[in-house]
Amino acid sequence: MIRKFPFWLHLVAGLLAAIPIGFVSLSGAYLAFEPQVDAWREAGYLEVVPGPDAARPGLDALVLSARSVLPGRATAITVHADNRSSAEVQIGRDNQVWVDPWTGRVRGHSGLIEKSFGFARQIHTHLALRGVGGAVIGVAALLYLVLSVTGPILWWPRNPRAMKRVIWPRKGLRGRARDWQWHNSIGILVLPFLFLFATTGTVVAWDWAESALYAVVGSPPPPRESAPPARSGQLLGANEGNNWQAWLDTAVLRAPAGWVTATVHAPSRGTGAFIQFRLPDQSIHAAAVVRLSPEGRFESFSPSRNDLGTRLRSLAIPVHTGRRFGIVGESVMFAAALAISLLAFTGAALSWRRFRPRIRPSL
């Protein structure tokens, strides 16, 4: 009787989250080793030979060079304080072009592999459905939390001696007994990772969860964008006007000392461009931000942040993906993501066996 409510809560949460969990876990497994693939692909793109400053083209020329290779709307360009690194031009949402900042020559651009990662990332974050897809993934993250809390209540044996039979799968089981055994065994093994995916995913997916994180540790929340992110066709001044270099020149006067990268984001409808300056080993969430008016004038400056809330928020994605711990962490998260997809499958199979109509043989 004590387990009845957790059982139904677990069952309903599992049924609601089964399909999103399947998509999210499989796409997450596919994305697990993206940094290594990117490093291999970009090995010949990133390092350039510095030339004379007088002949150095501006950012507008770099954007034009990038668009000559990958036509589309330029949404951002990242330049490095280190003059031996290529500039990266973002075309649309998931395409990048690497351009030599001294000659304007295109060094390389994203291909099929990067596009497949981009599509997998869309599946992982919003099921490749704008608007409603993000809400579905956000709810699924909350359901992850419900499953990670109710699961141990259900599989924890009344007799501690039976723990071994719950944890270790037995051979020779079939049908419902096999599904139940695998569901419990896998659930026990991936429980810490399920909870980790759930908590970090919730913080990333929901503004209120991010604000709660800052509030718990006593840090001021980050400022919210007054306008929604630009969609295709809503960018102003990104390609029609030669404003990229002017935007950077205006912003760099307020840049923090020691910055390593500057990312210039094109304006969206009703807002001006904004430029993020990152310091060494600093995440994008802690970057200093210079905002410009739609006319390109300086509007505001937000300094780099190093408070506890920002540091914790900056860890959310690296911990979620395992990249915080290098190849070992990524390998563990890869295995955990695959195991969670199997957990969703066995849970769905158990629910099907429970609710499917039983056909009695006719006499």
Image: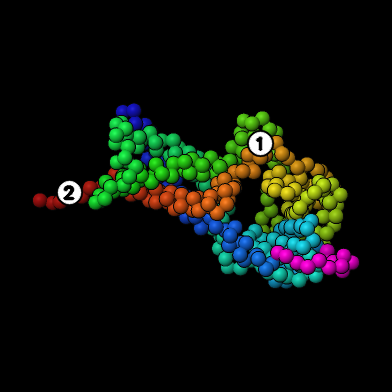
User: Which circle marks residue 360 in the picture?
Assistant: 2
Q: Is residue 297 visible?
A: no
User: Which circle marks residue 349 in the picture?
Assistant: none
Instruction: Identify the image's colour scheme: rainbow, by chain, secondary structure or one colour.
Output: rainbow
- How much space separates mark 2 and mark 1, taking CA atoms? 60 Å
Mark toward the start of the polypeptide (2 vs 1): 1
Horizontal relation, residue 261 to residue 341: left or right: right
Q: Position of residue 64 (x, y in %)?
A: 77, 68
Q: Nearer the viewer, mark 2 or mark 1?
A: 1
Q: Is residue 41 visible?
A: yes
Label 1 element class: helix
Residue 263's image quarter? bottom right
Q: In the rendered structure, which segment of residues is drawn in magenta?
A: 46-58
Q: Position of residue 294 (x, y in %)?
A: 81, 51
What kind of residue is marked 1? Gly
User: Which circle marks residue 309 in the picture?
Assistant: 1
Task: Name the residue at 79% across, 56% down.
Answer: 81
- How dense is the environment of label 2, judged by Cα within 10 Å: few (below 14), some, or many (20 and up)? few
Label 2 element class: loop
- How dense is the environment of label 1, judged by Cα within 10 Å: few (below 14), some, or many (20 and up)? many
